[in-house]
Structure formats: C-alpha cells, structure tokens
C-alpha cells in the first residue's frame, strides 16, 4: 500500500498512523539500547568455542541446583526462568541475526549465574560441579568469583 492509500485505510478503521509509527520506533530504539547493553556486559576474553564445550557440564549443574530442595527457592526460580528463557522461541534478538542472534540468551544466562554465585557462593557451586577443573575455571571467568 502506498502512503495515501494506507492513510485512508487507517482513517476508516480509526487507527492513528502516528501512534503505530511511534510504537515501531520505540520498539526499535528499545532493541538498540538492549543490544548495546548486551554488548557491554558480554563475557570478555572467552571464545564461543570455549563456552560451547562447557554447556553440558553447565546444564548438569543447573539441573542439580534446580532439583535440590536445599537450594534457596529464589535461586531455583531464577534458574528455572533461565531454562525457560533459553528454550523459548521468543527472543529479544532473533536467532537468525548473524553473530549476535544468541547474545540475549548468553547475557541472561550470565546475569542469572552471577545472581546464583552471589547467593550460593563460588565454593558451593564448585562442590556441585561435575565437569572438568578447566570448565569450572571458565565458568568462574565468565560469572566472576566474588
């Protein structure tokens, strides 16, 4: 549809074209701001290949923490929410966008794991880790140790 035709359709249906444009511009601006935040808080000095290698051990850790009743409820809720976020088809940044597509999942995972580390402590996480020493060292590099 061209501009005048779209204007007539919007007028007939009682839709304010300015409002629609404003919403679209607002969503694009929000997306851009989130993209910048994700870039700023990305794990530095860690390659994607290293992260991929530690994922199975990390999933075992998450399952262990979520299913253990001694883990505080808020931590279990955060980690369950993380799992839902990762498997959800709804993304802030669509997966088909090269390089940055999975960035929102990575950032949410890091934030959730940092929260978990602050609540439980690094030694508690180490005691629950079933992977390699190098894998845990990588996790600590990404989520911090203090």
Image (cartoon, rainbow, N blue to C red):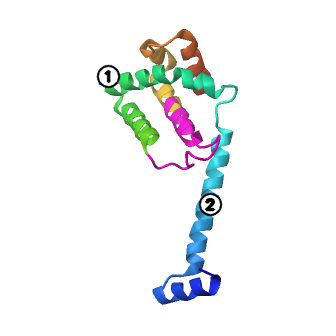
SS assignment at label 1: loop
Q: Which mark is residue 70?
A: 1
Q: Which residues are magenta?
A: 89-113
**Quarter that holds the C terminus:** top right
Q: Provide residue 99's location: percent of width, then percent of height.
A: 65, 40
Foreground of the two, 44 or 57: 57
Q: Is residue 136 visible?
A: yes
Q: Residue furthest left?
A: 69
Location of residue 8 (image quadrant): bottom right
> Is 81 rendered above or below residue 68?
below
Q: Is residue 145 visible?
A: no
Q: Provide residue 22's location: percent of width, then percent of height.
A: 60, 71
> Is 125 rendered above or below residue 11?
above
Q: CA distance from mark 2 to mark 1?
A: 42 Å
Residue at screen point 41% across, 21% down: 60
Q: Residue furthest front?
A: 1
Q: Provide residue 133's location: percent of width, then percent of height.
A: 54, 10
Foreground of the two, 126 or 18: 18
Asked whether, in this view, residue 135 is left or right of residue 130, the answer is right
Residue at screen point 42% across, 15% down: 128
Residue at screen point 64% across, 45% down: 37
Q: Which mark is residue 40?
A: none
Location of residue 120 (image quadrant): top left
Foreground of the two, 102 or 31: 102
Residue at screen point 37% across, 21% down: 64
Foreground of the two, 73 or 48: 48
The residue identified by callout 2 is 28
Of the image marks 2 and 1, the number of the one nearer the N terminus:
2
Asked whether, in this view, residue 131 is left or right of residue 42, the answer is left
């Amino acid at each position: 549809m061209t501009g005048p035709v779209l204007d007539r359709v919007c007028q007939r249906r009682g839709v304010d074209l300015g409002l629609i444009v404003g919403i679209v511009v607002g969503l694009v601006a929000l997306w851009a701001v989130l993209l910048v935040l994700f870039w700023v808080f990305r794990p530095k000095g860690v390659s994607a290949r290293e992260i991929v290698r530690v994922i199975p051990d990390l999933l075992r850790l998450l399952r262990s923490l979520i299913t253990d009743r001694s883990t505080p409820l808020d931590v279990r809720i955060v980690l369950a929410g993380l799992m839902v976020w990762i498997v959800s088809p709804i993304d802030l940044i669509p997966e088909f966008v090269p390089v940055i597509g999975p960035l929102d999942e990575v950032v949410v995972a890091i934030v959730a794991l940092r929260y978990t580390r602050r609540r439980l402590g690094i030694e508690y996480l180490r005691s629950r880790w079933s992977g390699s020493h190098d894998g845990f060292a990588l996790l600590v590099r990404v989520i911090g140790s203090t």
